[in-house]
Image: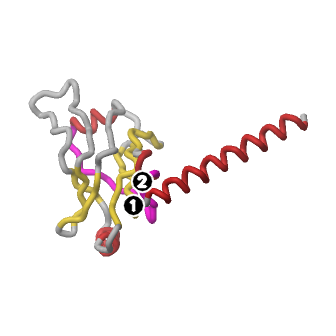
Amino acid sequence: MAKETGHKLIAQNKKARHEYTILDTYECGLVLTGTEVKSLREGRANLVDGYAYIQNHEAWIDNVFIPEYTQGTWTNHAARRKRKLLLHKLEIRKIETTVRDAGHTLVPLSLYFKDGRVKLELALAVGKKLYDKRQTLREKQDTRETARAVAAARRRQR
């Protein structure tokens, strides 16, 4: 069997970039069972309700939905269980000190395969206020409108 290479996206938390201001991102591994990996290979997962935290100098993620493997037997996993994250000790210490500050949180952004191994993109984030969300939407609309205007001007020049 040939070794897998490349980057294959499994699940993405698009809501997180709308709800939070991303300060820093980390790539970490996950401690998974066999049926969880098989279920992820089918491209089935949901990160929307997930959150991460540091407990006893270890990183954990909870409430990430990985459905049971359809061909699994009694060895199947629980769909929403807490899973250990694999990070370097210095990264965990850095995250732990910043999360202690008020308003900082750990949010999962995406789950993907990288060279055959499951990786999680974890973000250190601060929650946005309602007016920040409106400002972000307004900026996004403005950039879309300018791109449309530029494209229309280019089409007229031809």
Looking at the image, which residue is at 84% across and 40% down? 153
Outermost residue to the front? 131
Q: Is residue 156 magenta?
A: no
Q: Is residue 68 left or right of residue 93?
A: left
Compare residues 11 and 51 and report the one nearer the observer: 51
Disc 1 vs disc 2: Cβ atoms closer than 8 Å? yes
Type of amino acid at the residue the image marks with label 2: Glu
* Labelled disc at residue 19: 2
Above/below status of 90 relative to 13: below
Type of amino acid at the residue the image marks with label 1: Gly
Name the quadrant of the N terminus: top left
The range drawn in magenta is 18-34
Describe the element under mark 1 as helix, strand or loop. Answer: strand
Compare residues 23 and 103 and report the one nearer the observer: 103
Outermost residue to the right? 157
Residue 35 on image: x %, y %: 21, 35
Above/below status of 156 relative to 85: above
- Residue 114 in view: no
Q: Where on the picture, by quarter, is residue 44?
A: top left
| Residue underneath mark 1 | 127
Looking at the image, which residue is at 26% across and 40% down? 65
Q: Where on the picture, by quarter, is residue 48?
A: top left
Looking at the image, which residue is at 27% across and 33% down? 38
Q: Where on the picture, by quarter, is residue 101?
A: bottom left
Name the quadrant of the C terminus: top right
* Labelled disc at residue 97: none
Looking at the image, which residue is at 36% across and 51% down? 120
Compare residues 75 and 4 and report the one nearer the observer: 75
Number of callouts in the render?
2
- Residue 34 in view: yes
Above/below status of 37 relative to 109: above
Outermost residue to the left? 74
